[in-house]
Image (spheres, helix red, strand yellow):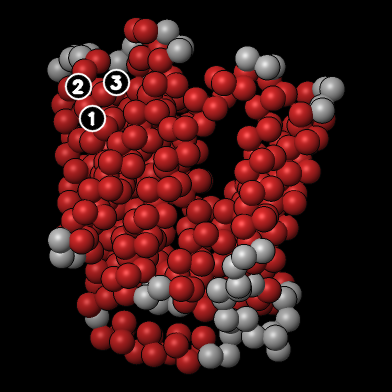
Amino acid sequence: MSFGMTLLVCGPISDCLGRKPIVQFGCVLMVTAGMGCAFSNSLSQLMFFRTLQGIGASAAGIAAIAIVRDLFDGETARREMTNLVLAIYVVPMIAPIADIAFLAHGWRAIYVVPIVGGLLLLAAMACFSESARVDPNVRLGLATVVQNYRRVLRHPVCVGSILCDAAAAGAVFACVTGSSLFFSNIFGPNAYGAIVGASSMSIVTGAWLNRSLCGQGASSTQLLAAGLALSTSMAIALLFMALVGDKSAVVVVLILVGVGSSFGLIAPHVIHEALRPMPGIAGSISAARAFVQMACAALSSALVVALFDGHSLHSMAVVMLAFSLLAVGAYMGVVRPANASSWSGRMQARFRRKDRDLP
């Protein structure tokens, strides 16, 4: 909750004050909170500092996507967004290994990782200049924040892309949550770590394939369509498998890999598409996207657990298919028509005029 809610505040702040100050603030808070976690003597203290850690992580993390949009345009921005998705999802693959290594020295040692990471990022930021075009005449205030989010909500390309990204993430989380419940009954709770690692690896694989195909001239539309088709077909296959009573662990793993790979294909393009119309408020758009994505992921996981009957794949299959179809509907029903209509040209010009007045 601290991570998700803080996103909505940090995004507009980074648009008005710049990306660098918000990253530096997040690093300082993350390091301080990490030390507080390591030296906590009660659960309440630990939860308090973990909340602060979430705020610091969101402040630092929200700037990454906005910085890519600040520095790159067009196809270059799309390629760099793919590299960013690759980097983001490599971390969940490495983190369990770090946990295992540090747990040998006690649970408090785990917090060495975010402390060191925050310090390294803080030092690295000293070498970088500000990427955002900040207007010194614009003051940060509630009116500016509200205005930025109104502009996001009124732009169908932004809204449709955000919903497509969030729904695709919801399909992944349905698969991860459902398969963890399924595998825990077969192999025990320790299978969950392997499941998370497999899903992260498959997303990285999809993003790597995305980058390779981009280099060979594949268009954004083609790769996005392929990702949406793969996600939906995996969900349909899983539903058929659940209906016939098949419980093959190998097939479930293959479906998990397929859904993760589809997200690696989808995410870079819809993120780029969401940021493309209004680069002046990339921080606000990035914050809205991340917040809605986290909300969809949480809802998806909650639905899978609520509908789980204790032994079958039905809840996982139904929720996964619902979110896959929502992703297809958001893109085909909102984004593509908006880009193809005469409305798009008029509104793009209007928003470009506003960008000269509002950062």
Residue sitting at x 44%, y 21%:
193
Disc 3 residue type (three-letter)? Leu
Disc 1 residue type (three-letter)? Ile
Q: Are marks 2 and 1 in contact (CB under 8 Å)?
A: yes
Q: Name the residue tied to disc 1.
A: 255
Q: CA distance from mark 1 to mark 3?
A: 12 Å
Residue sitting at x 62%, y 52%:
121
Q: Name the residue tied to disc 3.
A: 313
- Is 214 situated left or right of 283 in this image? left
The residue closer to the viewer here, 264 or 44, is 264
Q: Secondary structure at mark 3?
A: loop
Q: Name the residue tied to disc 2.
A: 251
Q: Earlier in the sequence, mark 2 or mark 3?
A: 2
Q: Position of residue 41 (x, y in %)?
A: 84, 22
Q: Are marks 2 and 3 in contact (CB under 8 Å)?
A: no
Q: Are marks 1 and 3 in contact (CB under 8 Å)?
A: no
Farthest residue toward the right? 41
The residue closer to the viewer here, 49 or 207, is 207
- Mark 1: few/some/many CA within 10 Å (<14, 14-19, 20+): many
- Is 73 situated left or right of 67 in this image? left
Q: Secondary structure at mark 2?
A: helix
**What is the quadrant of residue 104 in the picture?**
top right
Q: Secondary structure at mark 1?
A: helix
Q: Position of residue 95 (x, y in %)?
A: 51, 31
